[in-house]
Image (cartoon, rainbow, N blue to C red):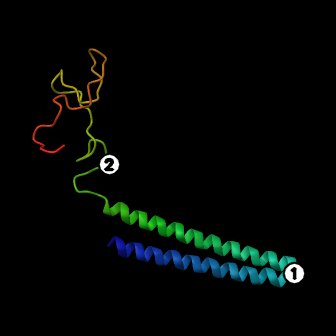
Amino acid sequence: MKSVKEKVSNAASAAKAHVESYKANLEEKAEKATARTPEEREIAHQRRKAKEAEAKMNMHVEKADHAAEKQQGKHHILGHSAVPGGYGGAPVAQTTGVPHQQPLGAVDPVTGTTVPTYPLGGHLHGHKHL
């Protein structure tokens, strides 16, 4: 479904770029019709080229945004949340519970020192390979 959405969005971006290019072409013709010198005609031509390039650049930026949206949708893993404390997200330090147990990396309120962030036993039990 994400691929279809990306393709439709890319097609809309391309159509938008073509419309901008067409408008730039019409503006160039109008400016050339009112131009009195060859230099003014050349300026009108350069403006058209700049507007077309800007339209193409915008189209490519939008396509990159669409691809990023698609990739972001693919990388969501069930049970993982970017919200701290959410299901599968980063744990939130709780102040309730057993009084002398602190989460790893927290500051001990009694001594003011940091609780170690590494496993104290040297290895994790239940894991054969680390």
Q: Residue at x 48, y 66 (%)?
A: 64
What residue is at 30 percent from the left and 23 percent from the top?
114
The local crowd at label 1, few if under 14, some if 14 to 19, many if 20 or more residues have their Cα within 10 Å, is: few
The residue shown at (31%, 17%) is 112
> Is residue 3 found left or right of 13 in the rendered image?
left
Mark 2 surroundings: few (<14), some (14-19) or many (≥20) residues within 10 A: few
Give the image location of residue 86, x and y in percent: 26, 45
Looking at the rendering, which quadrant does residue 129 occupy? top left
Q: Position of residue 9 (x, y in %)?
A: 45, 73
Which quadrant, please, contains the C terminus? Answer: top left
Among numbered discs 1 and 2, the one appearing first in the sequence:
1
Question: Residue 76 location, x and y as percent?
Answer: 29, 58
Q: Position of residue 57 (x, y in %)?
A: 59, 69
Q: Residue most toward the top?
A: 111
Q: Quadrant of residue 53?
A: bottom right
Cα separation between marks 1 and 2 = 60 Å
Q: Is residue 84 left or right of residue 48?
A: left
- The disc label shown at residue 46, or none: none
Q: Most extreme residue toward the right, as rendered?
A: 37
Which amino acid is tagged 1? Pro
> Dot 1 lies on which element?
helix
Residue at position x 77%, y 82% in the image: 30
Residue labelled with disc 2: 82
Label 1, on which residue?
Answer: 38
Most extreme residue toward the front, as rendered? 129
Residue kind at label 2, given as amino acid type: Ala
User: SS for tag 2?
Assistant: loop
